Amino acid sequence: QKEVEQNSGPLSVPEGAIASLNCTYSDRGSQSFFWYRQYSGKSPELIMSIYSNGDKEDGRFTAQLNKASQYVSLLIRDSQPSDSATYLCAELIYNTDKLIFGTGTRLQVFP
Amino acid sequence: DTGVSQDPRHKITKRGQNVTFRCDPISEHNRLYWYRQTLGQGPEFLTYFQNEAQLEKSRLLSDRFSAERPKGSFSTLEIQRTEQGDSAMYLCASNAGLAGSSYEQYFGPGTRLTVT
């Protein structure tokens, strides 16, 4: 059973701080990973995709992938209250076209 | 708006009734996916299409569920003889597939089903 694991949180950070969200996965063959943001009652919104080891930056967001250790992380710099949401980590299962999601980490950014 | 659209956004039905949901993918996206999400969980894969061909269906999916994409554009998901356990958010996503250079899937707003 291929799994993606995330700490459910909540992760509470003050406004302006760096929020660090982590995710581990079990399928060593997976090559593609994604971070989605989901506000309460809404659908997931794609924030970042990462396919190679190392860091990928997009604005205030940085995704990190370490295939040897099988973890993916998302850093949010200068966190804002509007970043308060659940962040879902997903992997694209190798040789298929389906995403496997973690249960999500709830982030709370307080003023 | 050129994103993924879903209809209806909310559906309340009585146990035993049939329901059908519709999804319109992003224009020119040839891959379309259905997921289901319950409270506190991440989305769970149900099935997906490449154009009109249904390429994979989750083994967890009951025979009461069927999906179609007859002309390779919009898709429908039907649930027959609904049960209370079918209450969930049904999400549709699309991807450019072979025509694109990424594996990114973009979700629609979802259809929230409540079975009473």
Image (cartoon, coloured by chain):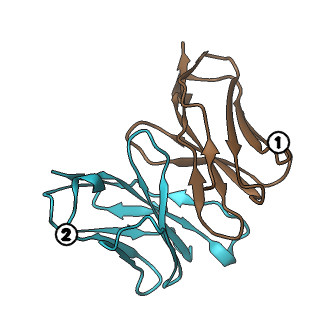
Location of the N terminus of chain B by quadrant is bottom left
Local secondary structure at mark 1: loop
Report if residue B21 is visible in the image: yes
Picture coordinates of residue B91, whole percent (x, y): 42, 58
Picture coordinates of residue A75, whole percent (x, y): 72, 31
Provide the chain ID for the residue under circle 1.
A
Q: Is residue A57 left or right of residue A35?
A: right
Does residue A14 lie above or below A108 as drawn? above
Local secondary structure at mark 2: loop
The residue located at (42%, 81%) in the rendering is B69
The answer to which of B32 and B48 lies nearer the viewer is B48
The residue located at (69%, 72%) in the rendering is B100
The answer to which of A53 and B15 lies nearer the viewer is B15
Where residue A12 is drawn, which disc sits there?
A: none
Question: Which residue position is annotated with label 2?
Answer: B18
Amino acid at circle 1: Ser
Picture coordinates of residue A57, whole percent (x, y): 78, 41
Where residue A69 is drawn, which disc sits there?
A: 1
Amino acid at circle 2: Asn
Quarter of the figure with residue A76: top right
Provide the chain ID for the residue under circle 2.
B
Among the chains, which one is brown? Answer: A
Report, in whole angstroms, how far the alpha carbon at label 2 lies from the one at label 1. 46 Å
Among the chains, which one is cyan? Answer: B
Picture coordinates of residue A28, whole percent (x, y): 77, 55
The answer to which of B97 and B82 lies nearer the viewer is B82
The residue located at (15%, 59%) in the rendering is B15
The residue located at (20%, 68%) in the rendering is B81
Asked if badges 2 and 1 are on one and the same chain, I answer no
